[in-house]
Amino acid sequence: IGALAAVEIGIPLPWMLGPMILVTISAILGAPIAAPMTLRSLLLPVLGVALGSGFHPGIFEQIGSWVVTIAILPIYIALALGAGYLVYRFIGKYDVVTAYFSSAPGGLNDMMILGAEAGGIERRIALAHASRILIVVSFISFFYATIFDATTIGTARPFTGFSEISFGDLTILTACAILGAMVARRLGFPAPLLIGPMVLSGIVHLVGWTDVPPPTLLVNSAQLVMGTVVGARFLGVAAREVLRDIGLAAIASSGMIAVTMAAAIFVTQVSGLPLRETILTFAPGGLPEMSLLALAMGADVAFVATIHILRISMVIALAPIVFRLLKRDP
């Protein structure tokens, strides 16, 4: 219902944003719902394959323009994390551990696990990241629709039906989804169900084994489930606590978005990359959500997804080290 209503109203990225908003409201009101985690596990590889289909042979000619973005990525992470930490530590009065891992711009699951192991309050960390993703995705979607007049969000790519994909291409895409997820999980990649299929799909599209994306119906279904899962993360939490966390996340996200805009403008001026792509690259939303926006807009998915993967990997690798140094300071 949320997705169809969003399509009818004209909300950007309707298949994800519509369910996300409606399920969030339902969860806060205490509706008897549950997150479809099994469906998420089944459809996340489809999303990975769809993102990988955005890779193309011409990408090698563009890699040189990514250097500036990669170079300032550590500075961006430090400033974005610092902005969030100040809010959660001094306004939210969170303890040092919970404030730090609530602010780290990494993956929700990874930060929740690392934070819990370090002694933080797992529920607060999860709510902080869920709230940030909700706010950032909503803001970026409407920002692009308003400022960039991105009225084609959700339809920038032509509709691809099952009948338009040959059996051979469908077999290749299915193999990318299954094998990519299995290999990435075995190798311990972050977000293996998404990154594994995306990397394998990117490879087969780069070498020219196939040039088609997954069926649009499956991609829309993956977006619907992703939006539902984000909204369902607010289940079982008192409305007052949810509203407080969303309020803190709104303040923290505002600081992070300010850092994002500054970094995006700098990279655009230095490298000449389009501002609408550099903003998506630095936006502190989730990898699936920001990559979906890039996919829906017809932006360079390879660029956006690659930088987000690097950011998440840096945060996961450095978070425990930086936190130990931070914790020494009384």
Image: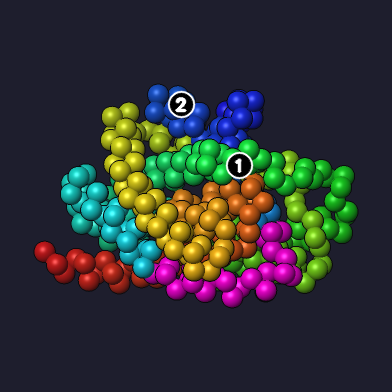
Closer to the eye: label 1 or 2: 1
Q: Residue at x 61, y 73 (%)?
A: 63
Eyeballing the image, is 184 above or below 91?
below
- Please determine whether, in this image, residue 257 is positioned above or below residue 176: above
Q: Does residue 56 show up magenta in the picture?
A: yes
Q: Is residue 124 left or right of residue 314?
A: left
Specify whether 204 is left or right of 92: right
For image coordinates 69% across by 45% down, the residue present is 156
The three-letter amino acid code for the residue at tag 2 is Ser
Q: Which residues are magenta?
A: 52-74
Residue 223: mark: none
- Rendered location of residue 240, percent (x, y): 28, 29
Q: Is residue 41 visible?
A: no
Q: Which residue is mark 2?
A: 26
Q: Is residue 38 left or right of residue 59?
A: left
Identify the residue under disc 1: 150
Q: Amino acid at mark 1?
A: Ala
Work out whether 124 lies above or below 112.
above
Q: Element under label 1? A: loop
Which residue is drawn at the image coordinates 36% and 68% (left, top)? Answer: 75
